[in-house]
């Protein structure tokens, strides 16, 4: 039996906590870029899965996970 390890995200677009402890708003475009970077890092670390949820609300950056996963697949 093989165990697969991975990460999941709903791509919520909450405020980012900066190194100095302040909070900064993150745009949906930046959040999507961050997710693609997370997927690339997960691949480099040898994780098997990156699951991405779908939401149609303004506080979630991804309404079409297939498109974001396809973008990440081009570099993993």
Image (cartoon, rainbow, N blue to C red):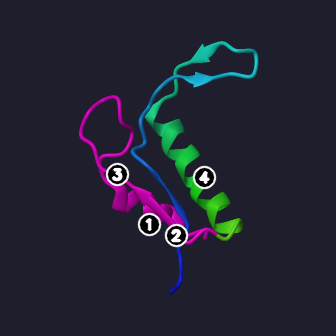
Q: Secondary structure at mark 1?
A: helix
Q: Residue furthest top?
A: 22
Which x, y percent locates residue 1?
A: 50, 87
Residue 70 is one of the magenta-drawn residues? yes
Neighbourhood count class around disc 1 (C-alpha, 10 Å): few under 14, some 14–19, many 20 upward = few
The residue carrying mark 3 is 53
- Front position in the image: 8 or 67: 8
Q: Is residue 65 above or below residue 13?
A: below
Neighbourhood count class around disc 4 (C-alpha, 10 Å): few under 14, some 14–19, many 20 upward = some
Left or right, 53 with respect to 39, comes to left
Which numbered disc, 4 or 1, marks the residue that appears first in the sequence?
4
Left or right, 10 with respect to 57, comes to right
Q: CA distance from mark 4 to mark 1?
A: 14 Å
The residue carrying mark 4 is 38
Q: Which residues are magenta?
A: 47-76
Which x, y percent locates residue 72?
A: 53, 63
Please tell me which residue is depicted at 34% across the width and 51% down the height of the picture.
53
Which x, y percent locates residue 48?
A: 55, 72
Residue 59 is one of the magenta-drawn residues? yes
The residue carrying mark 1 is 70
Q: CA distance from mark 2 to mark 3?
A: 16 Å
């Amino acid at each position: 039996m093989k165990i697969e390890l991975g990460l999941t995200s709903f791509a919520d677009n909450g405020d980012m906590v900066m190194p100095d402890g302040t909070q900064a708003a993150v745009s949906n475009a930046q959040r999507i870029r961050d997710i693609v970077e997370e997927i690339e890092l997960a691949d480099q670390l040898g994780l098997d899965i990156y699951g991405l949820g779908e939401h149609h609300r303004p506080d979630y950056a991804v309404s079409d996970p297939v498109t974001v996963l396809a973008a990440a697949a081009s570099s993993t």
